[in-house]
Image (tube, helix red, strand yellow):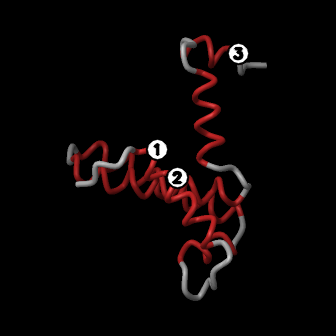
Amino acid sequence: MTKDSLGAVLNRLGATIDARRRADPDNSYTAQLLSKGVDACARKFGEEAIEMIIAATRGKPEELTAEAADVIYHLLVVLAAVDVTPNDIAAALAAREGTSGLDEKASRKG
């Protein structure tokens, strides 16, 4: 088991995904996904999210962990497809710190 923080792993994964966007799609799954555009990347993310939800209901932590890792990877691919970085997400989350989740959610309703 790694002792790396989630943030460190996400930063490395984000950098790898960014580097793979320039790779040959015949040699890189990430490059294949990105070459298909944001819609295809988002659909794949949705499929993985459903698999994670199913795993969560099965009560098997190791299965949920694996599916959650897939979801995070595919989320980062979607974000990369629209040039959003893990640091952008970190900044958005940091801006919400100290704010009630209910208040934050209400502030986004228009």
Q: Residues within 10 Å of mark 1 (few under 14, many from 20)?
A: few
Image-based side of 103 in relation to 53, left or right: right
Q: Locate the C terminus by quadrant.
A: top right
Q: Residue at x 35, y 49 (%)?
A: 4
Q: Which mark is residue 62?
A: none
Name the quadrant containing residue 104: top right
The residue that appears at 60% across and 73% down in the rendered structure is 20
Q: Amino acid at mark 3?
A: Ser
Q: CA distance from mark 3 to mark 1?
A: 27 Å
* Distance between the alpha carbons at the discs numbered 3 and 2: 29 Å
Name the residue tied to disc 1. 7
The total of numbered circles placed on residues is 3
104 or 110, which is in the foreground? 104
Q: Tell us which disc is closer to us: 3 or 2.
A: 2
Q: Residue furthest bottom?
A: 26
Report x, y in % for residue 102.
56, 13
Give the residue type that dot 2 points to: Asn
Q: Position of residue 48 (x, y in %)?
A: 46, 57
| Nearer to us in this view, 88 or 79 | 88
* Local crowd size for mark 3, using a 10 Å CA cut-off: few (<14), some (14–19), many (≥20): few
On the image, the x and y values in percent for residue 42 come to 63, 57
For numbered disc 1, what is the local secondary structure? Answer: helix
Q: Of marks 3 and 1, which one's residue comes earlier in the chain?
A: 1
Could you say which quadrant of the image residue 95 lies in?
A: top right
Is label 1 in contact with label 2 (beta carbons under 8 Å)?
A: yes
Judging by the rendered image, the residue that carries numbered circle 2 is: 11
The amino acid sitting under disc 1 is Gly
Secondary structure of the residue carrying tag 3 is: helix
- Give the labeled residue for mark 3: 107
Q: Nearer the viewer, mark 3 or mark 1?
A: 1
At x 61%, y 77%, the residue is 32
- In the image, is 61 to the left or to the right of 80? left
